[in-house]
Image (cartoon, grey):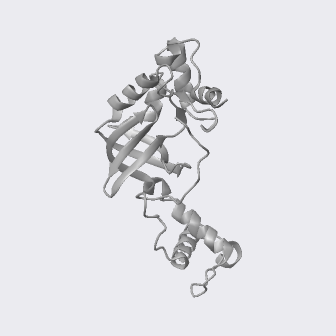
Amino acid sequence: MTYRLPRLRSVTSSPTQPVAAGVDWNDACALAVNVMLAVSNRMSASSTIPSCHLRSKRPKVGCWLAAALFLGMGVAHAAEITGIVQEVHDGDSLRLAIANGNIEVRLVDIDAPEIKQPFGKDSRTSLRQMCLLKQATVETRAEDRYGRTLGQVHCGGVNANAEQVRRGMAWVFLRYAPKDSPLFAVETEARLAKRGLWADDSAVRPWEWRRSRDK
């Protein structure tokens, strides 16, 4: 499905509550510096690590950076959202029911055939079999222009993004996937085995298909 350049947002533990909400940045700064001092006890705080003026409304830039880096240590854990898959729209997007509502999720780094393309409905069926009405965990990355959460989805312990590629039900999204993504090796193996869409030598990548439809 259509996938636009992500619009980065604050990492959240829920769709609405920022991880950093309510954080006193002066306190965070002080904590970060103290941790850094404990680790780097050979260094002088005055010469190597910026001091924090806790009563100042504008902490020094270095202090802000220290706090941001310290808080960033917990981002990977805070960015997970868990819920029940309520609906699967196609081979790379679904709706997740969570405690305070629903969120739309786009499986990141892959691109499944559009519903009107060959294997489009097969790809949707594949993702439904994997995830529909099951508990899923989303490792969030960002939010796209449509308000969908971009992330890696695990259903019943299975990495749905990678599994869709392994089954030959999606391509690695060349424009957005990191160059060193393990998904490329998974795609190569699926292609050599001629699984799913790779059984069709004339299969058209979804982004190329969309481009031709826009002309």
At 52% from the left edge and 64% from the top edge, which residue is drawn? 71
* Residue 89 image offset from top left, x and y in percent: 41, 36
Query: Which residue occupies the extreme bottom position in the image?
Result: 55
Look at 58% across and 35% down and name the residue there.
Answer: 181
Quarter of the image where the C terminus is located: top right
Q: Could you tell me residue 206's position as x and y percent? A: 57, 28
Q: Is residue 215 above or below residue 73?
A: above
The residue furthest front is 215
For the point 47% across and 59% down, the residue is 74
Q: Is residue 198 visible?
A: yes
Position in image of residue 184 (x %, y %): 57, 28
**In this rendering, is residue 213 above or below 5?**
above
Seen in the image, is 85 located left or right of residue 208? left
Q: Say if 127 sits above or below 35 in the image.
A: above
The part of the image, by quadrant, that contains residue 41 is bottom right
Residue situated in front as seen by the camera: 120 or 53: 120
Residue for point 48% across, 48% down: 148
Quick one: 139 or 15, which is closer to the camera? 15
